[in-house]
Amino acid sequence: MLIVACIKQVPDTTQVKIDPDTGTLIREGVPSIVNPFDAHALEEALRLKAKYGFKVVALSMGPPGAEMTLRKALAVGADDVVLLSDRAFGGADTLATSMVLTSAIRMLAEEDELAMVICGKQTIDGDTAQVGPGIATRLKCAQLTSVDRIEDIDLEHKRIRVRCKFEDRYEVLDSTLPAMIAVLREINRPRYPTVPMRLMANDACINIWDNSVLKLSEDVIGLKGSATSVRRIFSPDRPPGQILGGESVTDPEEAARMLLEKLVSRNVISTQ
């Protein structure tokens, strides 16, 4: 059975720049990294592969330079990788992106029975957390989000049990397979590739699919297929932090008391 791990190459957010005219990210000359949430998604897929014998395919949509992200996936143990790259895919919002990814997942599932799609909770360049659920909706499968633990998988009955973490509680959910699972960072710690695996990945052939492979109408992909557009983009105004007491406070207990008074006065915490 197949696990598709959706991963994305994102710009290093400490150096991100925005095109003021189009409202899109300027990626040229900006260092790229693997989306941190997606690194945990791939790691979880690899752990399930080791435990249950799944085949793991890493899937990404992006420019040709995103090959490096997929080579990293091969280096840590993915069985195969596919890069969806075509100018027609450019400028896509989450709706159009999920359309392209879903089409590729369906093609991959023609060769191996799909067990699950694993995504990171969100990407750090968009923070929408919409692509994973968009894939699940198009695949008409269960969607399990904010997952911090996969507790059990019953392959015979095609069931999965996961734990979802929320601000004030945990929920344990039981669902059918196939399913889309969006994971949190707490679910695992990604592994580092070995030197032999790095060398293998550097020489590997990357499968690149453009729209001539997917055969999607240009009305549902890229800018044309995007239901949303960016009207305005700006950096949020954040009030400067405050140093309590400045250099005059050298006693840690006094500093703690001042902090407590501030928090109580603003109803952040209660002393009762």
Image (tube, helix red, strand yellow):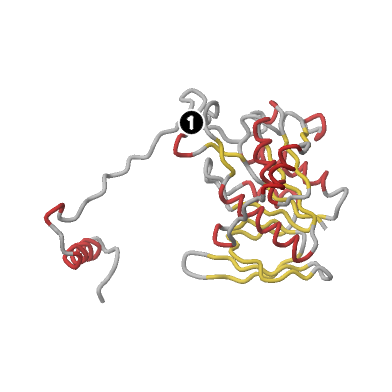
Image position of 155 (left or right of 230): right
Looking at the rendered structure, the secondary structure element under dot 1 is loop
Image position of 124 (left or right of 261): right
Name the amino acid, label 1. Answer: Arg
> Which residue is rendered at x = 78% and y = 34% of the image?
209
Image position of 254 (left or right of 227): left
Q: What residue does disc 1 label?
A: 231
> Which residue is rendered at x = 66% and y = 44% of the image?
72
On screen, residue 71 above or below 28: below
Image position of 257 (left or right of 68): left
On screen, residue 197 above or below 269: above
Which quarter of the figure is the N terminus placed in? bottom right
Which quarter of the figure is the C terminus placed in? bottom left
Q: Where, by quadrant of the figure, is residue 266 drawn?
A: bottom left
Q: Mark 1 packing: few (<14 Cα in 10 Å), some, or many (20+)?
A: few
Q: Residue 251: x and y, percent? A: 16, 64
On screen, residue 21 above or below 176: above
Q: Residue 188: x and y, percent? A: 59, 61
Q: Residue 221: x and y, percent? A: 70, 33
Work out whether residue 150 or residue 135 is closer to the camera in this orientation and state it: 150
